[in-house]
Image (cartoon, rainbow, N blue to C red):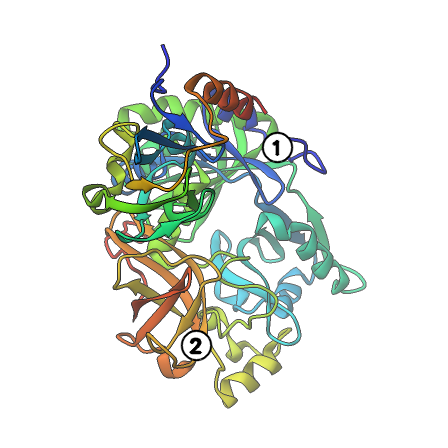
Amino acid sequence: MASQSPLKRTPLNEEHRRLGARMVDFGGWDMPVQYSGVIDEHKTVRTAVGLFDVSHMGELMVSGRGANDFLQKMTTNDVTKIAAGQAQYSALCKEDGCVIDDIIVYRRGMDSFLVCVNASNTTKDEQWLRAHLPSSGVILENESEAYAQIAVQGPKARELVQQIVDINISQLKYYWFAEGKVLGQPSIIARTGYTGELGYELYVPSQGAARIWAALVEAGQKFGGKPCGLGARDTLRLEMGYLLYGNDMDESINALECGLGWVTKFSKGEFIGSKALAAQKEAGLKRQIVGLQMVDKAIARHGYKVFSAAEGGQELGWVTSGTVGPSINLNVGMAYVTPDYSAAGSEIFVEIRGERKAAKVVRKPFYANGTAQL
Amino acid sequence: MSQYPKELQYTKEHEWIRVDGTAGIVGITAFAIEQLGDVVHLDLPKVGAKFKAGESFGTIESTKTVSDLYMPVAGTVAEVNTALTNAPEDITQDPHGKNWLVKVTLEGAPSNLMTADQYQKYIAEASSH
C-alpha cells in the first residue's frame, strides 16, 4: 500500500526482514511487531532472554557548563540525586504540569547527559529543550541518527551481553550504566529496560548495529534467546504497569494524574510545571491512573469508557491500555478514574462494544516476579 | 496443494461458510489467523441472534488488536462453538474444520462469495502489497 511519506527505518531494518519478522508502521517507523509470536516472545523474555530493536527511540545529548542546572529546571525528577554513571526516570512537563514526554536521563559527567526520549516525541522534545536553552553554555545535540539501541531483556541477559562487551557488567546495578565497547564499537551499556526483567539497553553506533544485532541473535541461541517485536514489548511493559506515552499519558494529562508523582520532586525547588503541579496536589486530583483487572471475560482496550455501575451510574474515565497478560493469564489494563474509585478493590465497569463488563481496580505491577532489580 | 477447502465459500473479510441446504457453518480463514497473531479472545453471539449478510456478528482479539467478524450470509445463529470460545488460542489448529465459529440457519442464498481459487488469488494479491 502506498503511504504519504516513506517509513523511517532503523539500522536493523534489513536484519528484521532477513529473519522473517512481521513489519508494521509504528508511528512512522517500519518496525517489527512480532517474530515467532507475541506470547512466545513474551515468555522468552520472562524465562530466557529477548532482543528488541528500539533504535527508533531518540537520543538527545545535553552538555556544557550549566547542563546540570538546565535539566534540573526542565525535568520533574532531581538530577542532582544521580551520580556519573547513573540513570533516572523522569519527565518533561509544560508550565501547566501536563506531560510532554517521559524520559530517561543518563548522567555521563557533572555537566554531560544523554536524554533518551520516545521516538514520536524526539523532534518535539528537542524543540522544547532548545527553546529553553540558556543564552550560552549548554549544548543540545540530537544524536538519534548516530545511535541504534538494542534492548537485551530477560534472566539470561547478563550472560549474553557479557559475551560481546569489553567491560565487566556483573556489578552494574539497576539504573546504572557504563561506557565500553560492544564488539569494538564505543557504546553505552545501560542496565535499564521496559520489561520488568534483568536487562540492558545498548546504545551502539548505527554503522555497527547490524553486526552487533546478528552477534546477539547468534550468541543468544544457546540461552534460549530470540529476537522479539514491539507486540511483546507492549505486553511485557503492561504486565509491569509501565506507562506508554501516547496511550497512557499525553499533553492533556498532568504528571500527578498519570502516576509520575514518584519522579516529581518538589523538594528540589522550581522546575517547569512545578507551580501547577503543586497547586493540583494541594487542590486534589480530578482523575488518577489505576491498574485494572477484568472480572468478566473480556479485554479492555485503549479508549473504552469506564463506568461506576453495570447500568446507569456515572462515567468515571477511560481505559488507556489493555491486554491479556501472557505470564499472569489475566486480562489487565490501565485506566483513568475519578479519585473516589481509585482504591484497590473498587468495582468498575468497562464498556466494550455497548456492553458494560465488570472489572476491578488492582495495584500495579500485575506481574510480581520480574528480575529487573535483582 | 491448497489449504483452502474447495467446498467452502469465502468473503473478502476472510470468513468462510460451508453451505448445506439451509444450514451453514461459519469460520475464519487460516490467512486471517496468521495475520492476527496469537488469538486470545473470541466474542460470539447468542443462539437465536439474527444477522444480515455483511453484518458484524462478533469479534476476534489478538494480543494487539480487535477485529470484527462479518456474517457471509443472512441468517440466524443455531449453534455457537463454545469449546472454541473457552480456548480461543486453539483456532490456529484446523480453522477450516473443527474450529468453526457459529452454525447458522440461512435466510436466502449466499451471494458475492469467492471460491477457494478466487480467495487464494485474493490473498496472494493482498499479501504482495
Farthest residue, direction top: B1
Q: Can you say whether A41 is above or below B116 in the image?
A: below
Q: Can you say whether A80 is above or below B43 in the image?
A: below
- Looking at the picture, tell me which residue is in the foreground, A355 or A277: A355
Quadrant housing residue A272: bottom right
Amino acid type of the residue that numbered disc 2 sits on in the rendered structure:
Leu
Percent across and percent down for residue A339 are 41, 81
Q: Residue at x 22, y 31 (%)?
A: B98
Horizontal side, residue A140 vs residue A100: left or right: right
> Which comes sooner in the sequence, label 2 or label 1?
1
In the picture of the structure, the residue carrying the numbered disc 2 is A316
Percent across and percent down for residue B112 are 50, 31
Dot 2: within a 10 Å radius of its alpha carbon, few (fewer than 14), some, or many (20 or more) residues? many
For the N terminus of chain A, give its image quadrant: top right
Dot 1: within a 10 Å radius of its alpha carbon, few (fewer than 14), some, or many (20 or more) residues? some
In the picture of the structure, the residue carrying the numbered disc 1 is A9
Dot in front, 2 or 1: 2
Quadrant housing residue A357: bottom left
Q: Secondary structure at mark 1?
A: loop
Q: Can you say whether A153 is above or below A74 in the image?
A: above
Quadrant housing residue A145: top right
